[in-house]
Image: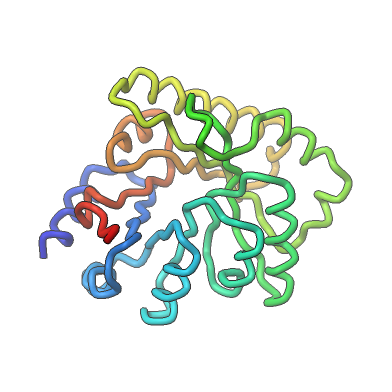
Amino acid sequence: MEIVENLNTIKSSLKEGVKLVAVSKTKPAEDILLLYNNGHKVFGENKVQELVDKYEKLPKDIEWHMIGHLQSNKVKYIASFVELIHGVDSYKLLKIIDKEAKKYKRIVKCLLQIHIAEEETKFGFDMQEIDQMLADREFINLNSVKICGLMGMATFTDNYDVVRHEFKNLKKYFTQLKNNYFYNFDSFKELSMGMSDDYPIAIEEGSTIVRIGSSIFGSRNYN
């Protein structure tokens, strides 16, 4: 029951209105079911195959989030059930999500991933690319996706001043896009930032969704 205690401890520390995505990557379905039976229904995966496998095994009222880098050729496997895709990092990917969602007569919620970290390995738009996408005529015809906010990953570092600066920048970009493009869209309200090591800072800087794995489930099973 340690993972239940971990979950409850983290939940009790969150501000009202902050959603906790329990990131269950590499963990067995039994661990997810344990938390589910204790009332938690929001889970995230960063690999499509693992997400599909767990979706098929587990209760269908679980809210599944795709939090990792999503390859365009794998969208079709999750379009029928995924609740929120955090890492939409290109216009091409957004168009494919729209195309696949249409097949199921669904509207898939998406977050635009912004590159805020110093690390080049992180994915994401820059703000100029987002401005170009939102100004494109084709964009308004994407009726099977809903842009609900932004997501970002901070630099992997022990220097929390760097992390805080990057989260501040993401919040600034969120406000800028809200004011310039999404002012009348109530659905544009989410800011997904913060993981096990840095979620308290992320919440202080305005996060509405935190993605927490190892602090709940323990270290990953990569074997």
Q: Provide residue 8's location: percent of width, then percent of height.
A: 19, 55
Q: Provide residue 210's location: percent of width, then percent of height.
A: 38, 45
Say left or right for 68 vs 79.
left
Between 37 and 152, the one lying in front of the other is 152
Q: Is residue 215 above or below residue 24?
A: above
Between 17 and 10, the one lying in front of the other is 10
* Quadrant (top left, top right, bottom left, bottom right) of the N terminus: bottom left
Question: Quarter of the image holding residue 58?
Answer: bottom left
Number of callouts: 0
- For image coordinates 45% across by 65% down, the residue present is 64
Say left or right for 6 vs 109.
left
Q: How is the image coloured?
A: rainbow
Question: Quarter of the image holding residue 54?
Answer: bottom left
Q: Provide residue 134's location: percent of width, then percent of height.
A: 77, 40
Q: Residue furthest front?
A: 223
Q: Residue furthest right?
A: 137
- For image coordinates 62% across by 44% down, the residue present is 89
Q: Provide residue 201's location: percent of width, then percent of height.
A: 33, 30
Q: Is residue 65 above or below residue 184?
A: below
Q: Is residue 143 above or below residue 170?
A: below
Between 25 and 6, the one lying in front of the other is 25
- For image coordinates 64% across by 28% down, the residue present is 176
Say left or right for 70 vs 16.
right
* Quadrant (top left, top right, bottom left, bottom right) of the C terminus: bottom left
